[in-house]
Amino acid sequence: MRVNLARRWACLILGGALLMPYMMVGVLVGGLAGQGTATLMLPVELGVFVAVLPVVALTGLFLPVRGLAVSAAQGLLGAKVLTPPRQERRSWQERRRTAAWFTLHLAVGGVVSGCTLAVVPFTLFTLAQPFVPGPIDVLSLRVEAGAPEVGWALVGVVTLAGLVAMAAGSGALLARLAPVLLGPTPAERLAAAEEHARTLAERNRLARELHDSVGHALSVVTLQAAAAGRVLDRDPATARTALAAIEQSARSALDDLDHVLGVLRRGETPPGREEEAGPGPRAPQATLADLDALVAASGARVRHEAGDLSGVPAVVSREAYRIIQEALTNAIKYGRGQVRLSVGVHDGELRLEVRNPIGTRTAGPGGRGLTGMRERVRLLRGELEAGPAPAPADATPDATPDASPVGTAGEGWWRVAARLPLRSGA
């Protein structure tokens, strides 16, 4: 309690010290205007004190004093002031609140500082009276030795106690008002909430990117490793091709993982130190232009049909690439046989479809693949269909070395189809 009172008293003294230049100029201007000699060491006059407060308010309105005020409130008053977000331009609401705090701090601090300068010497003087022989003058009054001196000593103690109470009350008042006047304004709180929402959206997007990229890479690695193991002895060239595909998929997944971790670390960088954290890794920008490489690296047998995709906007192209990547991943994990992929632009929409024969393995609970695809399509105001579908009319038996023929017209297939408008208003 005593430490808290001392710090708050120091904050009030700081306010008085900041008020002194205004008071000195006010006394000087008042003396010159009255055609008299300006005496700067006279006690504070109430008129000058009141006259300089509007000037103090203007200072708080236009000068950047908020940072100093927040530091003083947090360090000396012990107030829990939320650090306001950094903004390029100060709003008038923030200026008015800062000016109100600055004026209040200097006004209250000036009064407490003036009283401190007057009361403390007065109390010491009255306490020393009984030890001084003979009568003495106190406030132009002759005080005789004995009981009158003791009475004046008690007056000094009571006055000092009143000063302590005034300092404690003033400090508590400023500590209570600091979060209100120096904390974030409603506009700043709204901006902080929007920034938080953007951060959460970005992290959700990164989670989807990581799920799609790493999940696809692991599926490709599993498929290619199994293929390499089967042909390692009789066809080393095919095994080397499979191993190269494994290496490429793993590198791509590591690059995406490095990007995600870099963004997350950058999001934890303290404000004002973003430059020290560096620009961060470049975000993955895979688009439909990379579709051939995706199909080639997948290791699956894909019947690929693509139209002219040069007019597809970049954001649609990126999301479509991720949707196809996830659909191929599911086809590799849960299907068998040849995968059919078609993508093209029709009537102002990007239409893509992935079909594959349904395998014997089923998806476990907690999967995020279809959910992620639906989220991507919904953000682009498109439509997504995913579920069992009849086999294409031209489907032919598709025999595999370790499975019975599948993929004929009478067997079940899985179909993922998406329609993405090329323009937001479509």
Image (cartoon, grey):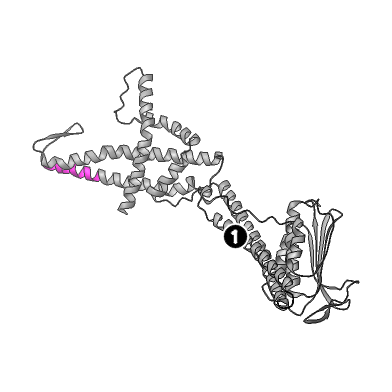
The furthest residue to the right: 393
Residue 5 visible in the picture: yes
Q: Main secondary structure of the magenta part?
A: helix
Closer to the camera in the image, 321 or 230: 230
For residue 189, side relative to residue 401 (left or right)? left
Most distant residue in the top direction: 35
Q: Can residue 4 be found in the magenta stretch? A: no
State left or right for residue 298 relative to residue 283: right
Residue under circle 1? 258
Q: Image point 34% across, 52% down: which residue?
A: 4
Q: Position of residue 22 (x, y in %)?
A: 39, 30
**Quadrant for the N terminus in the image:** bottom left
At 58% from the left and 46% from the top, the residue drawn is: 187
Name the image quarter holding residue 409. Answer: bottom right
Where residue 355 appears, x then y in whole percent? 82, 69
Residue bounds of the magenta highlight:
146-158
**Residue placed most toward the observer, 343 or 35:** 343
From the viewer's perspective, is 147 left or right of 189? left
> Circle 1 — which element?
helix
Q: Quadrant of residue 69?
A: top left
Residue at 58% x, 53% y is 280
Q: Is residue 362 visible?
A: no
- Look at 44% across and 52% down and name the residue there: 80
Q: What amino acid type is highlighted by mark number 1?
A: Asp
Mark 1 Cα-neighbour bin, 10 Å: few <14, some 14–19, many ≥20: some
Query: Is 190 situated left or right of 373 in this image?
Result: left
